[in-house]
Amino acid sequence: MALTQRLEFRQSQSLVMTPQLMQAIKLLQLSNLDLSAFVEEELERNPLLERASDGPEPPVAGEPVAESAEFSDSGHDGDEGGSDASDMAAGAGGEAFEPGQEDWLNRDLGSRTEIEQTLDTPLDNVFSEEPAEAAARAAQDAAPTAYTEWGGGASNDDDYNLEAFVAAEVTLGSHLAEQLAVAFSAPAQRMIGQYLIDLVDDAGYLPPDLGQAAERLGAAQADVDAVLTVLQKFDPPGVCARNLSECLAIQLRELNRYDPAMQALVENLDLLARRDIAALRKLCGVDDEDITDMIGEIRRLDPKPGLRFGTSRTQTMVPDVYVRPGPDGGWHVELNSDTLPRVLVNQVYYTELSKTIRKDGDKSYFSDCLQNATWLVRALDQRARTILKVASEIVRQQDGFFTHGVAHLRPLNLKAVADAIQMHESTVSRVTANKYMATNRGSFELKYFFTASIASADGGEAHSAEAVRHHIKQLIDAEAPSAILSDDTIVERLRESGIDIARRTVAKYREAMRIPSSVQRRRDKQSMLGNALSAPATSSDRSRDTAPA
């Protein structure tokens, strides 16, 4: 068999990832905030893109412009040189202003004697000679008649911004820095204090190890410890602590409640977390009534004092889709128009430019701008249609959830929705990312409705994992303090309800919902029951050794 070379033509189809296609795919998975930021960048970059305004459309050339209802447009269409006085006179009287009536403005009135003879009285009787200074003083003393005279600006001005009058948000760092300027006068101490304040996190804690602070600042460790002792007395109480025990101890010293028994309790918070009340009572050397009071005082303290001061504003979740009950018993799905950016392609501007552009480089640049602008408008429209299509299918699949609640949430995966709307699973995955749906039962992320399937114990229809978690939470919330449900008992209860589930799955779901184990729940509920029973017999003025440690 001889090897030869030959030239062949072959025709085939393939999908090429063009920049426009990659951009359209990227737009699908953006949230409404990220999409708004992206569109703003494109508006600044592309001169052929413009924001579609919600106001009236601009007038077409050649058509008369409608006047305001307060004024008449008779006799003044297109008269740009007419005075304001003539316009108001024509609008009020309804008669056209005669040009001959302006002659008296240019007429010579003659000397003072002639004017007095004409008026048959001296000019002093007609025009009172008030000094200019008195008139200016009277105008200054007069009360302002408009809001703008106070210097605040008119409320209907476009440049008027109410946020300019809002006080700046006080952060924890600035609050501590103000106290630092008062507490220390030496520059070295202020430098050490400001360095430590910069290390404080949002919760108000310092790093556990401050050994490198003295080395980096070139100061003695004793100086750093002395400044830290003063910082720990700043407001809010408990700030600048290095761990939870130190934070609680600072607050107890502030309340004059840090006695030896309370010190032993604060130093053994791990026993309190495990609800080992017997060991705590033995270490503190108190009875049941005192240990109950001490635990109550600990719970009233603030474990994160720095969170009282905000560092950043929380952005409110804005839904992308609204689901409302329809008049026919179904559900009406609509997009949130406020989250959809409105952009248009300025074809008029491109037409005017194409007539004047002569350089090939400029023509190529504006052609690319026109192509990108057109593609972006189409991509935004396709994104909105795809979101609406996916959301409508989710509502159709999960009709039981919207009608009856979480217990009727069906198992659903991406493939089921993708096959129903004839799209790829990756497209559905991108659409459901960072998108939210406002329903009659609250606002949920679109991915919330996609849950795993759990088999039925009697061979019936499978159950949704979210519905099973809801069932587990209901069982635990309804348990009595004397009959705490273990994970094995929960498995038996679920199987009686027709849900076939393993014990490790119950434990996984319980931990995901931050529900403690049966042992911890038994201790918590028995402790709460004991507090409730001993509350009437507890005396508020019971004395205890309060000598500070």
Image (cartoon, rainbow, N blue to C red):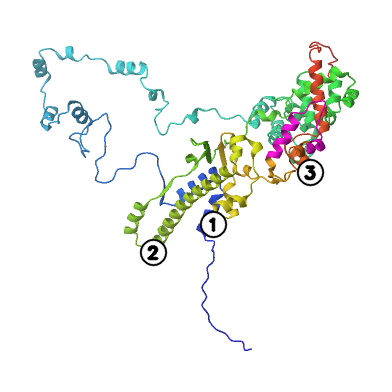
Q: Amino acid at mark 2?
A: Asp
Q: Residue 466 in the image: x percent, y percent?
A: 68, 40
Q: Which residues are magenta?
A: 467-492
Residue at which label 3 appears: 502
Q: Secondary structure at mark 2?
A: helix
Q: Residue 384 in the image: x percent, y percent?
A: 49, 47
Q: Residue 209 in the image: x percent, y percent?
A: 79, 38
Q: Amino acid at mark 3?
A: Ala
Residue at which label 2 appears: 360
Mark closer to the chain start, 1 or 3: 1
For the stretch drawn in magenta, the main secondary structure is helix
Q: Which dot, 1 or 2, sits closer to the camera?
A: 1
Q: Which dot, 3 or 2, sits closer to the camera?
A: 3
Query: Left or right: 173 with respect to 286?
Result: left
Let me know if residue 475 is in the magenta part: yes
Separation of marks 1 and 2 at Cα, in angstroms: 28 Å
Separation of marks 1 and 3 at Cα, in angstroms: 43 Å
Q: Residue at x 9, y 17 (%)?
A: 118
Can see residue 258? Answer: no
- Asked if residue 13 is positioned above or below residue 543 in the image, the reply reads below
Residue at which label 1 appears: 22
